[in-house]
Image: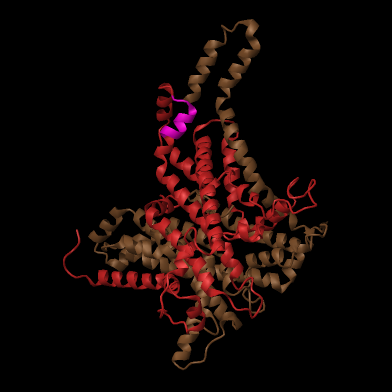
Amino acid sequence: MNRDGKTMTTAAAMPNAPVGRQPQHLWKRFRTRHRDAMLAAVILIPMIVFWLLLSGFPTLFGFLLGFFRWVGLADSPAFIGFDNFVHFFKDPVYTGALWRSIWLGGLVTGVTLLSGFGAALLMNMPLKGKGVYRSIWYIPAVTSTVATTQIFNLFLDTNNGVINNFLKSIGKEPIVWQYSVGWGIFWIVVYSVWKGVGGAALLWLAGLQSVDHNLYEAAEVDGAGTWAKLRNVTIPGLKPIATYIFITSLISAIQIYEQVLFITNGGPYGKTEVLVFRIYRDGFWDFNLGMAGASSLVMAAIVIVITVFYYGWATRSDRRTTIPVKTLGRGG
Amino acid sequence: MFAKRFKPSRALGHLVLLGVGLVLLYPLIFMIMAGFFTKQEFTSSVIHAFPVPKEPTLDNFKALLAGSTDAAVTVYFRNSVLRTAYNTFWAILTSFLGGYVFARLRFKGRDQLFLLLLATQMIPTTIAIIPTYLEFARFPFFGGNHVFTGGKGILDTWWVYLIGGPGINIMGTFLVKQSLEKVPIELDEAAKSDGAGTFRLLFQILFPLQLPIMAFIAITTALGTWNDFITPFFYTNSDSLQTLPSAITRLSSVMASPGAVINYPMIITLSLGVTIPALLIFFFFQKYIVQGLANTGIKG
């Protein structure tokens, strides 16, 4: 539309162009014809250059890192091909962390989404003040992970923690949470669900409200009860959205590490380490930059494979074409 | 609209939503109650699930206000505010301009470029943490570096916070693009034929129409930056460059030597400082968050 107008002006101006002013005319024609492209360049180039500086280049660099042996910042990197990856899949420290990332991510996703779904069903009822409930449930999501994990640590303190003080007051032995893998995992899951359940409920709620209302009426005419409506209308209607929610949640849950860092710090003996936590440890404590790069690549590969499969499914079934993406505005 | 007669399912709904809701709020309630303790009382008394101080004090809250006695806390607070404002400003600007470019301008390779940018969003951010550290350390001609090495580059300087700002916010661009595509292009043409230049078209006509989505981008960016500990924690070291979250990180068990006593009263003060503003932002703008969350993915 815009372009049609422009082609007309140039076409009209062309035959009358005086020969002597050709260069200026050419520039004018170039300017009108490529006005959009030039404006785009002026806007985009600086933004993309800065993006490359902080995201693009480091990401690419991160991919390359995996193929080098580089221990300690002063070391000079040596190209070793796939050796880091061979080491990754041989060393139980890494395979253990990878496996833990996957099942812990799955566990967190499952618990968060199921409880969020229950909450969304309740929030979808015509209750007075449901907006207030929605806000209350979402509040943990806007708090700082660093700050709230410290409050959890106050509950879990061995000597003067809230839970141990309670156990002592009813005559039970205090528990040293930090010595137990099971409890470590338990509290990581509790924290993650605490933080995620409100967001999950909001997403489910948006999904529930997008289900066609006529279907419910039709089901009611057919005499369906609450349970039958849930099973036959709500759940099938939610399928594409449910897949989207599940995939995005899983992708972020297999990458959790902040709560691991602050609640267990990987302990005891590295038995609660997840892969992204391992990347952080390799990079900033052991300065094993090559292995950190290789682990990042494995994590990236997993995320990309999940995304591509999902994307294929979504396009094939002509449903949703949004690429599952990370949350907005983190850091940088 | 609401049925007068008592419905057990609704009562159960209220009960569960309120009951679990209070459990979810409990850690924050605990944090606020602990904030009324004096340092001595908090470290010396036995902490219960609902800690009630014997001599309540407002000192911890006062320490957060500007011009307080605790100069370090004031610095952390100021840095957090500055970083958040800076990143939010750029997120709004780059998302809006990026959205405009990809929704309205026609040029060769536009869609391919956009897809490429969008595709980079599936790569986990963690991969970039260590390379970013190396890049900052070897930044040419900064911090005593000759070409690539020699000094500490831009590590531990304000550049760490400033450099990323003008970079394009890809998710924001995606959201603005989607939202702009719903605005009829005739509006642009009408504005242009009325003599509005590109600048006016952008900021006086199109921008006001995008306010809800811009608000969502601004709020998520603001909260993300406000709560972010990674950038200050990994790339700076000076006390004068720390933000509230990174200051908490430095006091936490992560950085403490084994067996050291954790300074929980200070952690609680800082935690209040980082949590209360986030809650205020949320309360004032929650309408946009709920709308925006639904916009990011859940649409038929």
User: Chain B, which colour?
Assistant: red
Which of A168/B125 is in front?
A168
Q: Residue A202 at x, y = what percent?
A: 40, 59
Could one spot residue A103 in this view of the protein? Answer: no
Q: Position of residue B300 (x, y in %)?
A: 40, 49
Residue A8 screen position, x and y as percent: 50, 16
Residue extent of the magenta highlight: B196-205
Q: Nearer the viewer, residue B59 or A313?
A: B59
The chief SS type of the magenta part is: helix
Q: Quadrant of residue A28?
A: top right
The colour scheme of the drawn protein is by chain
Residue A308 falls within the magenta-colored stretch: no
Front residue of A255 and A174: A174
Image point (63%, 58%), residue name: B126
Which corner quadrant of the image does residue A209 belong to? bottom left
Establish if B92 lies above or below A134.
above
| Residue located 75% across and 64% down the image | A288
Q: Position of residue A314 (x, y in %)?
A: 50, 52
Is residue A295 at least partly visible in the picture? yes
Q: Colour of chain A?
A: brown
